[in-house]
Amino acid sequence: MKYIIRAKKLITVTDVGTIENGAMLVEDGIIKEVGRWDTLKNQIPKFDLIDCSNQVITPSLVDCHTHLLEFAPSSLYPVTTKTHFLAGKAILFKALSSGITALGEQICGHPLCDFSVSEYRDAVADFPMDISFATTSISIGFEDLAHFTSITGSKAVSQSDLTSSNLVKKIAENSDYPGENIFINATPANFTEDVVPKAGEIIYTTEQLKEIVAIYHDADKKIGCHVAGEEGIGMAIKAGFDVLHHAHGITDKQIDKVVEKGIQIVVTPMGGTHLPPNSPEQIVKLIERKIPVSISTDAYLPPYPGVPWLPFQDRSLKGPDSLMLIAGPSMKLLKNTFDENQILALLTNSPARILGKENQFGRLEPGLAANFLVAEGIPGLEITDVDQIKKVFYKGVKVIERG
Ligand SMILES: [Zn+2]
């Protein structure tokens, strides 16, 4: 399959920047050339024309921290083991129709699910989306703390099991990328405050964290953590984590350390920890320090209450279709100082890099997969409504079309 697709402008998210009146050649699912329409149009009729000259083309979106296949199906639908992945695929389809063609999924262990990590992988192997899995352990802040792991399924484990090097090794072996591989603080998960009074409690010592990090690094894997609050973040930095997820409540001094150590941060402005989530001002501060930042939803999640930058009126669970909406305030605040390509990288190239797939997708660049969308404006910056995303392409194939 060979085509040339024309647009009002292409946001490449590369050094080339924005190309007005641009076009892109796609062959066998790969981007072949990106340039001006004037210089590429002579490729017709060798290449079929798809004319989107009134619309914008950008790389499709990447949400590098989600819980769509393990926690979401039973939170959203009355599923059984038999129908769990039917609901899972419906949830993935909603993400795809929101312009997202790559996910970083967490498999944490869950009281209601006994699927193995490979069953999650197999269930979505044919879905037109690139899914990386982070295998993790999780600590939920109930009155009696509850711990699970991706290896032990629905059976709760003890706090001391969490640092068993055998178990940690198995978790590390199955992990594709540095997601929230361990929860330094107990999480509120999707529960209201009264049910999870111990959310925020620190589960590990710095020594234990160092040992866990060493197990991942010895296996040649990067490791990320769920962390919030000055104390936990300080421990994570000392222990040598590669990626901090959330980092709610990070201090200016800790930002200096993060810069010094080259740590990446996945911010979740909708919530996800016991503390108020990353504000647009904090996200701008991280980016001004040139820290590689990705914005992600941590979906499905109830929005943190009383946060002025979130537009939600209720606390019902929000999904990846909210990615543009929750990223919008930060992206708009960056507009005074940064180019639109650098800003869109927060939802494309940076999360692709967290997944270790920056050489596969996340930019409009020759040689990368033709994962892109056609929209009425730049996602997050100019549009936040998924209905304004008109077409989504995955590996060169149109998978979403809106009239
Ligand atoms: Zn999470």
Image (spheres, grey):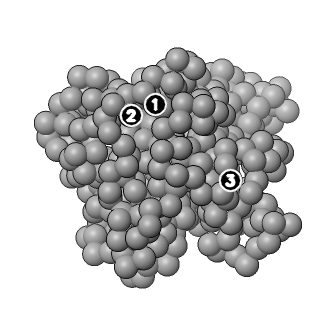
Residue 167, x across and y down, in percent: 60, 36
Per the rendering, the mark at residue 212 is: 1
Q: Is residue 108 above or below residue 305?
A: above
Residue 253's disc is none
Give me the C-alpha separation between circle 3 and circle 1.
20 Å
* Residue 376 visible in the picture: no
**SS at circle 2:** helix
The residue nearer to you, when weighing 205 against 60, is 205
Q: Specify the amino acid type for callout 2.
A: Gln
Q: Secondary structure at mark 1?
A: helix
Q: Quadrant of residue 44?
A: top right
Disc 1, disc 2: CB below 8 Å? yes
230 relative position to 174: left or right: left
Dot 3 or dot 2: first in sequence order is: 3
Closer to the camera in the image, 308 or 254: 254
Q: Residue furthest left?
A: 253
- Return the residue at label 3: 153
Other residues around mark 1 within 10 Å, as few (<14) / some (14–19) / many (≥20)? many
